[in-house]
Structures are given as structure tokens and as C-alpha cells.
Image (cartoon, helix red, strand yellow):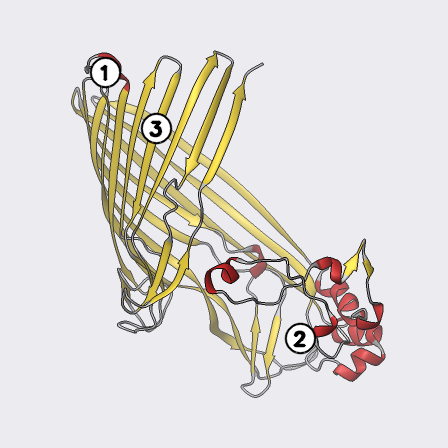
Amino acid sequence: FLGTNSAQLPTDSTIETFGDHKTGLKIPAWNANAISVGRTLVNPALWRDDIYFAESAKYTGTRQVIETVKAGYLMTQGMIGKTGFITGVRVEETDDDSSGWVRARVPSSAAEQLADPVGAARKDYANTRRERSGNYTKAFPSAHLTHDILPNLKARLSWSNSFGRPPLSNSYPSETNNDLAQTLTISNPSLKPQTAESWDAALEYYFEPVGSFSASWFHKTIKDYFVNGVLSGTVGSGSDNGYNGEYSGYTILTSANLGTAIVQGWELSYQQQFTFLPGLLKGLGLSANTTILDTHGNFGSTTTTRKTGEVPGFVPRTANLSVSWRYRKLGTRINLNRTGEYLSAFTAAGSGRNQYTLQRTVVNVGAAYQFRPSLSFSVDVGNIFNEAQVFYRGISDNISEYRIPGVTVTAGVSGRF
């Protein structure tokens, strides 16, 4: 933009935002047609192409990651009396190879970029192509047991191992130097996956007509969080140090696998079809569940331990209730989802800057009609009471954000032809 002030771009007074409506403020807004129409600038004198950006994007936008995964799985299952079992192990070998350009240690100046944008982009990137590679092998065993205590009482116990791969963006070559601190921050294509070891136990009781109640407990240990800025060595000297002979003696900072956390909790669940009721009531159905969670660990930190109420995004209490009713070709349902209060942004333990999300109950309703065996119609209304999502800092009276998501209506047709 070559103009001297925003007044050179005419605002559109017909644009009204939600903030204008609620606060009475009239914040200036611009219509895209005031800038260009049909990819043609309305006033070319106010704009110029950023040629350096386009030329440098040829380097920064040209990169690749090839991830090769070789896997094998061995499983066995069977019955011993009233006890059933399924056990197995999955082994994965992962190789990552990546390449791309990073910016030179001494980049071009703004004057060079303006005078010779093509040459400046070449100076910044042409001689700093990097290639990175990494690999890891992981095994993930599991075992699942079921036992019929009584004809209508079943016990379950399972042990499993799972993982979450590092983001592919971590495999791209990247370098950020700090000459004052003598550090070089780089990506780590050898970053291993985050792993979780889980134990689950449950008791399930089945009763007539068409009902069940279950109580389950689970315990999950999460390891190898992805942590940035970890000290991992020093850059060597010589032209073959991997950085064109630059950064000799610099401290290398990169991402690494660190930390442990434990998540555990209980879940209670009940569901039943009330087919024993008279008349139209026999089409009623009910299901409900509630979950109580607890957590503690360092979550990748080397100095701080956190617990429930100090982990952003961790929801310790949830509950769901669903009531359905069917009659001939018509089916209806009401779902109630309740989320307890939880921490959404953490500053420090006891800090008034910690942000929390207030408890929230959302009600959804829906109906479906089976017009014929191959054709059905449905309509669903989400958040029918337009329940807001409210955030506060420190104390609940200190509201920091109030989101009104609105009501959604979805209609559909399903057919088989």
C-alpha cells in the first residue's frame, strides 16, 4: 500500500458487524470491491507488487517431507472357559526425509530487497538448502480380557499402548539464529511419537427389557511430550559442519521428547428402552452417562508439576442425557450435553490472569421420518436455546469473553437406490 492514510480507501457504511450492533460503535470497514474488481486494481497508484516476497516464496514454499512407515501386526484370540481374550502387538518403523531452504545467517537489507528483489531473494536462500532425516521404531502391544461373571454381568479389562506422531512440520528444515545469545534453533526430524499406556476396567450389567448399566475406570500414562527449545549440543567448526561453515560454537536448541502425565477417571453409563410401558410410551428410550477425570504430571516441563485445574483444555466433569421416542415411522430425540467449568489458559497457579470457561449446557433436538424403506427425512436443531460460551479471568464475575454461537438447523434426505 503506497497511500498516506486509510482515507484513500473508501469505507462501506452498509457493512454492520455484531460489535457495532452491541456496542453502538461504528468501526470502519472496507469492501474488497473498493480495492480491486475482477483482479484489477481500482487505483493502481496506491499499490505495488511485493516482488521480493514472491521471489523468496519460491524458496520457502518449495520443500518436501517423505515419511515411510513399515508396520506389522500379530494378533491372537480365544476363549478359556468363561474368559475371552484378544492380544497382539503392532510394530512400526518410521523414516523421515526432508529438504528445503532456510534463510541465510546475514539476510539482505530492505534497501537491497527494493532495488534488486530477485537478487536479494537469491542471496537469502539460494545457498542454504538443507536436507534432514530421522527414524524411529516403536512396538505397541495390547491385551483385552472379558469374563462372564453371571449371565447378565460381564467384566472387562484391557491394557493397550498408543501413540501420536509428531507434526510433519517439525520435519521441515528450519533454522533461527540468535547471534547475541549464540544459539541456533533447528527442527528435529528424529522426534519420536508421544506415547500413552492405558488400563481400562469395566463392569457391565444387562437387564430386561433392553437395558444396561456400566461402571468403568481408566488410567492413562502419557510420555514423551513434544517440547521445544531443548539444549541438544554445539555446532562444530569447519565447512562440513552442516551449516556451510557458519554458527561454529553456537548452542543448538531443538524439540525433544520429555515429560510425563497421568490421566485417570470414572465413567457411569445407563441406557434402556421402555418397551414395558403401555401405549405410545413404549417407544421411549433413555441413555445417560457422566465422566469424572483427574490428572497430574509435568506435561513436558522440566521444572513444574501441574494437576487438575492447572492444565488448559482439561475438562474434569462432563455429562450427557438423551431421551428418544419412536412411533411407527417417526423417531424423535432430545440430547443434553453438559460440560463443567475448566481452565482454558494458564499463567501461574493462583494467578488472576488464568482464564476459565464457565460450565455450559447445550440442548440439541432432532426428528426423522421413514417415508419408505429406501427413503427417510431428518431435521436437527443444534443448541436450540442458543447457549453462550462464557470465559472469565481470575473470578467468575470478571468476564473476559462472551461467545454466542447461534442455533444451527440441519435438514437431510437419506435414500438407497
Marked residue nearer the N-terminal end (2 or 1): 2
Q: Secondary structure at mark 3?
A: strand
* Residue 79, placed above or below residue 1: above
Residue 355 visible in the displayed image: no
Relative to 372, is 116 on the left or the right? Answer: right
Relative to 257, is 399 on the left or the right? Answer: left
Nearest to the observer: residue 219 or residue 38:
38
According to the picture, the residue beneath numbered tag 3 turns out to be: 333
Nearest to the observer: residue 203 or residue 408:
408
Label 3: few (<14), some (14–19) or many (≥20) C-alpha neighbours in 10 Å: some
Q: Secondary structure at mark 1?
A: loop
According to the picture, the residue beneath numbered tag 2 turns out to be: 243
Mark linked to residue 344 = none
Label 1: few (<14), some (14–19) or many (≥20) C-alpha neighbours in 10 Å: some
Q: Residue at x 28, y 51 (%)?
A: 340
According to the picture, the residue beneath numbered tag 1 turns out to be: 275
**Based on the displayed image, in which of its 4 quarters is residue 103 positioned?**
bottom right
* Residue 317, placed above or below residue 16: above
* Residue 132, placed above or below residue 381: below
Three-letter code for the amino acid on which mark 1 is drawn? Thr
Three-letter code for the amino acid on which mark 2 is drawn? Tyr
Residue at far bottom of view: 180
Closer mark to the observer between disc 1 and disc 3:
3
User: Residue 205: x percent and y percent?
Assistant: 18, 27
Marked residue nearer the N-terminal end (3 or 2): 2
* Residue 179, placed above or below residue 216: below
